Image (cartoon, helix red, strand yellow):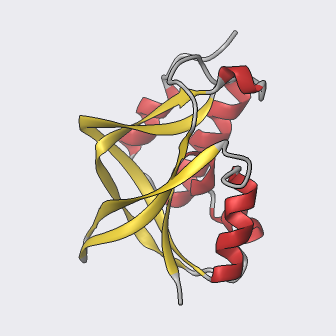
């Protein structure tokens, strides 16, 4: 049985997802409405804050959808820190051209705040480009403030 996963941030990069979940096909792209991309966990110490999502009625986040095999899901849970309580996995509704689907996302178990490093944000911009995100979404990412 497959689990639908909605990738955002640096996980939008198809090559990165192929390395982390090699048996899980890309199913398409969509939008997570009512949420926004933000950063948090600067206390973790990974070059500044890391990407996460928070509920926001006016927000929308571009995502890539993957049908995860059970083995790839376990590996991705470990990679994302679900097993260490860094991130938690929750189900959300994703809008696609084919309708809505329930999918899992990873949400940081830390407070929102702080800035990402310039390098991390550049990785996220490139990932969004590779995934086919719209230009206005990419430009909004590109112009976010970074840690100096």
Q: How many marks?
A: 0
Q: Does residue 142 appear left or right of residue 59 in this picture?
A: right
Q: Does residue 26 appear left or right of residue 74 in this picture?
A: left
Tell me the residue at 43%/52% (across/down): 133
Q: Does residue 102 appear left or right of residue 25 in this picture?
A: left
Quarter of image, res 14:
bottom right
Is 111 drawn above or below residue 65 in the view shown? above
Residue 95 image offset from top left, x and y in percent: 27, 63
Q: Quadrant of the C terminus?
A: top right
Tell me the residue at 69%/75% (across/down): 72
Tell me the residue at 44%/33% (across/down): 139
Tell me the residue at 67%/61% (across/down): 77
Residue 112 or 141: which is nearer the viewer?
112
Is 40 drawn above or below residue 21 in the view shown? above
Residue 90 image offset from top left, x and y in percent: 45, 56
Residue 83 image offset from top left, x and y in percent: 72, 55
Residue 26 or 110: which is nearer the viewer?
110
Is 43 drawn above or below residue 76 in the view shown? above
Residue furthest to the top in view is 148
Quarter of image, res 115:
top right
Residue 7 image offset from top left, x and y in percent: 52, 58
């Amino acid at each position: 049985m497959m689990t639908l996963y909605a990738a955002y941030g640096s996980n939008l990069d198809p090559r990165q997802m192929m390395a982390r979940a090699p048996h899980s096909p890309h199913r398409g792209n969509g939008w997570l409405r009512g949420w926004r991309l933000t950063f948090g966990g600067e206390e973790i110490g990974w070059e500044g804050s890391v990407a996460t999502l928070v509920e926001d009625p006016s927000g929308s986040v571009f995502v890539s959808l993957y049908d995860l095999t059970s083995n790839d899901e376990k590996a991705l849970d470990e990679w994302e820190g679900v097993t260490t309580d860094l991130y938690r996995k929750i189900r959300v509704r994703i809008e696609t051209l084919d309708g809505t689907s329930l999918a899992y996302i990873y949400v940081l178990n830390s407070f929102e705040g702080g800035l990402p490093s310039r390098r991390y944000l550049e990785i996220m911009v490139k990932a969004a480009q590779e995934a086919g995100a719209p230009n206005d979404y990419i430009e909004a990412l590109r112009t976010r403030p970074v840690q100096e």
